[in-house]
Amino acid sequence: MGAADVVPGVSGGTVALVLGIYERLVASIKAGSSALGRMIRGDWPGMRRWLRQVDWGFLVPLLGGILLAVLSLARILESLLHDYPEEMAGAFAGLIAGSVVIAWRLVRRWHPLALAAAAGMAIAIFYGLGLREGTSDESVTQLADPALWAFFLAGAVAICAMILPGVSGSFLLVVLGMYGPVLEAVNERSIATLAVMAAGMILGLAFFSQLLSWALTHHHDTVVAGLIGLMAGSLRVLWPWPDGLDSTVLGRPDENMAGVVGLGVLGLAVVVLLGRLGSRVE
C-alpha cells in the first residue's frame, strides 16, 4: 500500500482491496475518526469506547509498512523526476488514465447529474490547470517553496484517497502542485514540515472520512463521476512536454515520444490489472 501511495495514479485503497483487507481497514479508520470526534467534544467515555473498536493489532503494523515504503521509495522517485521528467510524466499520466478506467466501472448508473458532474469537473480542472505558468521540467510536479499551511492542506486532502479504491493520494498531490515538495520533505527528514502534514492527515481523515462515507452512501454515482472528471481534467498537468502548462497551448512531442507513450501504456495496463484483481477479490 505504501508503494502504491507514493506513485500518482495507483491507489492504496485498490491494493488493500486486492489483498482482501479493505473492509477491515475502513472499519478501523471509521472507529478511529469517531474516537477523535468524541475527544473533541469532550466525550471521554465515548472516545474510549470507539478506541476499543480500532483493530490496533492490524492497523499499527500496516501503518508501519506504509511508512517504511514511503521512506524507501521517495528518494528514488525524486531522482527519477529530476533525471527523466518526460518519461516519468508519461508513466504517471498512464497510471492516472488507468484510474479513470477503474473509477468509470464504479459508477452504477450514468444519470444526467452524474454526467454533468464528470463533464463540469473535467472542464474546470483542465482550464484551471491551463492558467498555471511554468516552463521548467520541475513545474509539472511542484510549487516553489510552499508554506507550512500548504503541507497541512495537502495532507488533509491526499489522505482521503486512501479509502477510495481507484483514486490516488499522490495524484491529488500532483494536482495541488505539492508532489515534489512532499517528496523533498520526506527525503530531507524535515520533521516540522512532516509533523504539520501529519496533523492535516489526521484531521482530514477524521472529518472527511465521515463526510465522504455519507456522500458515497447517498450520492454514490455523482461523487464518483465527479472524481472521474477530476482525474481526466488533471491529465493536463502531466503532459510530458514542459510547454503543456503554458497558457492553454499544449506543447509538441519530441524525440522521446515513443518511450513516453510506451511507459504511459504500461502504467495504464498495470492499474487496470490491479483493478480487475480487486474486483475479483471483492
Image (tube, helix red, strand yellow):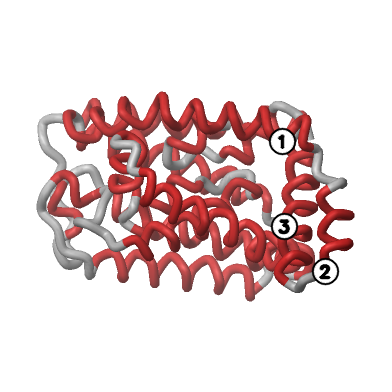
235 to 24, vertically: above or below:
below
- Mark 1, Cα crowd under 10 Å, few <14 / some 14-19 / many 20+, is some
Q: CA separation, marks 1 and 3?
A: 13 Å
The answer to which image quadrant residue 24 occupies is top right
| Residue at the image position 44 percent from the left and 63 percent from the top | 153
Residue 102 horizontal side relative to residue 193, left or right? right
For the N terminus, which image quadrant?
top right
Instruction: From the viewer's side, name the closer residue of 167 and 179.
Output: 179
- Mark 3, Cα crowd under 10 Å, few <14 / some 14-19 / many 20+, is many
Q: Which residue is mark 1?
A: 59
What amino acid type is highlighted by mark number 1?
A: Leu
- Mark 2, Cα crowd under 10 Å, few <14 / some 14-19 / many 20+, is few
| Residue at the image position 21 percent from the left and 56 percent from the top | 145
Q: CA separation, marks 2 and 3?
A: 14 Å
Q: Earlier in the sequence, mark 1 or mark 3?
A: 3
The count of marks equals 3
Q: Earlier in the sequence, mark 2 or mark 3?
A: 3
SS at mark 3 in the image: helix
Q: Which residue is mark 3?
A: 33
What amino acid type is highlighted by mark number 3?
A: Ser
* Viewer-side label of 2, 3: 2
SS at mark 1 in the image: helix
Instruction: From the viewer's side, name the closer residue of 261 and 16.
Output: 16
Q: Earlier in the sequence, mark 1 or mark 2?
A: 2
The answer to which image quadrant residue 214 occupies is bottom right
* Viewer-side label of 1, 2: 2
Q: Residue 18, image x and y in percent? A: 69, 29
Residue 43 tag number: 2
Q: Residue 54, image x and y in percent? A: 80, 44
The answer to which image quadrant residue 175 occupies is bottom left
Instruction: From the viewer's side, name the closer residue of 197 and 180.
Output: 197
